[in-house]
Image (tube, rainbow, N blue to C red):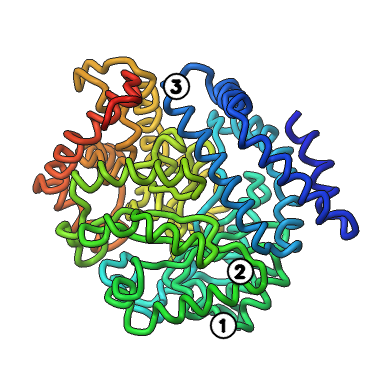
Amino acid sequence: MLNKTIKPIASLIQNKTIGKPVTNLLFSLLAIYLSKEHYKEKLKRNLRSKFGKKDFPEKVWNDISIALLSMIKSVKRTYDRNISPKIISKISSILPVLIAKGTQVRLEIAKKYGYSSTPAFVMVSPTNICNLKCLGCYAGENYNKHILDFDIFDWIINEMKEKLATRFFVISGGEPFAYRSKGKTILDIFAKHNDCFFLVFTNGTLITKKIVAKLGKLGNVTPAISIEGFKEETDARRGEGVYDKIIDTMKNLREKGIIFGISTTPMKHNANLLLSDDFIKFWFDEQGITYGWYFQYMPIGRNPRTDLLVTPEQRARMWKKAWQHVRNGYFIADFWNCGTMSRGCISAAKDGGYFHILWNGDITPCGFIPFKDKNKKLNNVYSLRKNKKSIVDAINSPLFKEIREWQRRQQEHAKGKKCRKCKGYGCGNLLMPCPIRDNSLEFDQILKKTKALPFDEGAVNYKKLIRKGIMPSYNDSCREKMDFLWREYYINNHSKRKL
């Protein structure tokens, strides 16, 4: 039904003659929709109907609807400023394909594998090469240079399109714009797969005017540029002069009407700044970003720094401030504190979630889970091709299945029922959604059960942080704050209480 509605609208948007007036009318109607409380309630009802009626507390559905409305407001604000018609046309052509094929693919996979969920996207890190050396970067700590073969890169995307009907890809690194293989660059991937849309995590310093012009012609890429705050904070972690290059890159992107956003890493010293009103207004209102991704610091890599982790008190304040900005129409997502947006962890190829493929071909459940399945035939894309296996085989490996089972249990407990194990609601707390970072002891049990292999030395070091009690202690401290918020705001629905 939804596809029958979207497809004709998408066709009108792509029309060269009437595309722009149709898009203007669409956004005008959305503006009216967003201003009416009646329609907001209707959106929540539709979400509950589609994803599980009363499975989750009312406040969870409220968060999801607020996030969707915030996304629409952010896109409209960018559109009013200047979005390339090429990009709008590209998005509108891809969306119907995703909706039309999604149900069919789920049924086929369920029949063959007994696994009825399909990931919405894959994140590919085609190289760990980078022109910067940022403090605490998990990629930069790997000193051996790796480059994913272009043909393998191409095969991954074709596999995702054919087997899982995916048309959305996230590219990370290293620095994606430093990728070179067989005389080709990341732009060749974007051009070859022009029926897909790519979100690229980048430091922004290699996006020249020439590259911006190519991105504008392609219309299927949105850069998420990494920043640490303002000039002082960004240059301190990323290197002198990086901030000015980022500002210049954003200016060039605005001029070509390209949608772009930011990616940032909250740590103890900058967490408060990254969610301040001045920070949000500067990047959204002055620099023209459409979205902001927040990845709280993870102590992985060769030299993990637990002293950089945000404090439990900061994390609670960040939850409050993040949702304040989302309610005000600035689309940001803190992948830990905003776990209700996605109804928990999205790793391990969860339905609607994702998984990660690294520069050497290794397949891991998440960009922040540096472990792979013990089965060598399934844990690497080169091995998949050699053994005539598919991506779907890889995401049905024991490690992936066990993490998805953990996610299922957390979602069950998130429905508001007390758990016998924790004698409360803690293990269903969607504000503590991450298995490896927020629930480290349970994650360690998953590692032991599946005999998962560490990706690198950083993974070995992280296991030591768990088994020495450092991460479990941090988890307990965070739970004192976050379990209270989950219980009082979401379960007991004391929304008027000052939290």
- From the viewer's side, name the closer residue of 80 and 440: 80
* Percent of width and height locating residue 93: 76, 51
Does residue 448 appear in this view?
no
Q: Is mark 3 on a helix, strand or loop?
A: helix
Label 1, on which residue?
208
The residue sitting at 58% across, 72% down in the picture is 186
- Compared across the picture, whether 355 is left or right of 102 comes to left
Between 491 and 111, the residue placed more toward the observer is 491
Assess disc 3: are there few (<14), some (14-19) or many (≥20) residues with their C-alpha within 10 Å of its C-alpha: some
Name the residue beneath numbered marker 3: 58
Q: Of the residues shown, which amino acid type is indicated by label 1?
A: Thr
Give the residue displayed 40% in from the left and 28% down from the top. 408
Q: Which mark is residue 151?
A: 2
Label 1 and label 3: CA atoms lie apart by: 46 Å
Dot 2, how many residues are within 10 Å of its Cα: few (below 14), some (14-19), or many (20+)? Answer: few
* Cα distance between the residues tagged 2 and 1: 26 Å
x, y percent for residue 25: 78, 46
Q: Quadrant of the N terminus?
A: top right
For label 2, the SS is: helix
Q: Which of marks 2 and 1 is in front?
A: 1
